[in-house]
Image: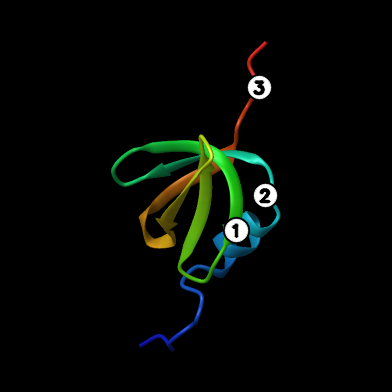
Amino acid sequence: MTQVGSISNPYLYETLNMMIGQAIVVQTKKNIQQGKLISVLADDIVLEVSRTPFFISMKEIVWVTLATMKK
């Protein structure tokens, strides 16, 4: 049993913390979201898409990568 406030995936948490402020792509169990990573919380991330914050549960994340710029 995990403690309240504990981090469910510390490796993902640390990796995402290094990506704060950057454009990322997040694959969840339901869809793909792309936007600027604003914040990383214990159980969620905050992704800004078209000036709107989206909270994504860490448990829903399948993979994450930096967004690439198209030329």
What kind of element bears circle 3? Answer: loop
For the C terminus, which image quadrant?
top right
Q: Are marks 1 and 2 in contact (CB under 8 Å)?
A: no
* Residue 22 relative to residue 59: left or right: right
Q: Are marks 2 and 3 in contact (CB under 8 Å)?
A: no
Q: Residue under circle 3?
A: 69
Look at 63% across and 15% down and name the residue there.
70
Name which of mark 1 and mark 2 comes first in the sequence: 2
CA neighbours of label 1 inside 10 A, class few (<14), some (14 to 19), many (20+): some
Look at 47% across and 45% down and name the residue there.
63
Residue 19 - label: 2
Q: Residue under circle 1?
A: 39
For the N terminus, which image quadrant?
bottom left
Look at 52% across and 48% down and name the residue there.
47
Name which of mark 2 and mark 3 comes first in the sequence: 2
CA neighbours of label 2 inside 10 A, class few (<14), some (14 to 19), many (20+): some
Q: Are marks 1 and 3 in contact (CB under 8 Å)?
A: no
What kind of element bears circle 1? Answer: strand
Q: Could you tell me how far apart the alpha carbons at marks 1 and 3 are, in whole angstroms? A: 22 Å
Residue type at tag 2: Met
* Residue 21 relative to residue 38: left or right: right
Name which of mark 1 and mark 3 comes first in the sequence: 1
Q: Could you tell me how far apart the alpha carbons at marks 1 and 2 are, in whole angstroms? A: 9 Å
CA neighbours of label 3 inside 10 A, class few (<14), some (14 to 19), many (20+): few
Residue type at tag 1: Ser
Q: Quadrant of residue 69?
A: top right
Residue type at tag 3: Met
Residue 28: x and y in percent read: 37, 46
Observer-side mark, 1 or 2, equals 1
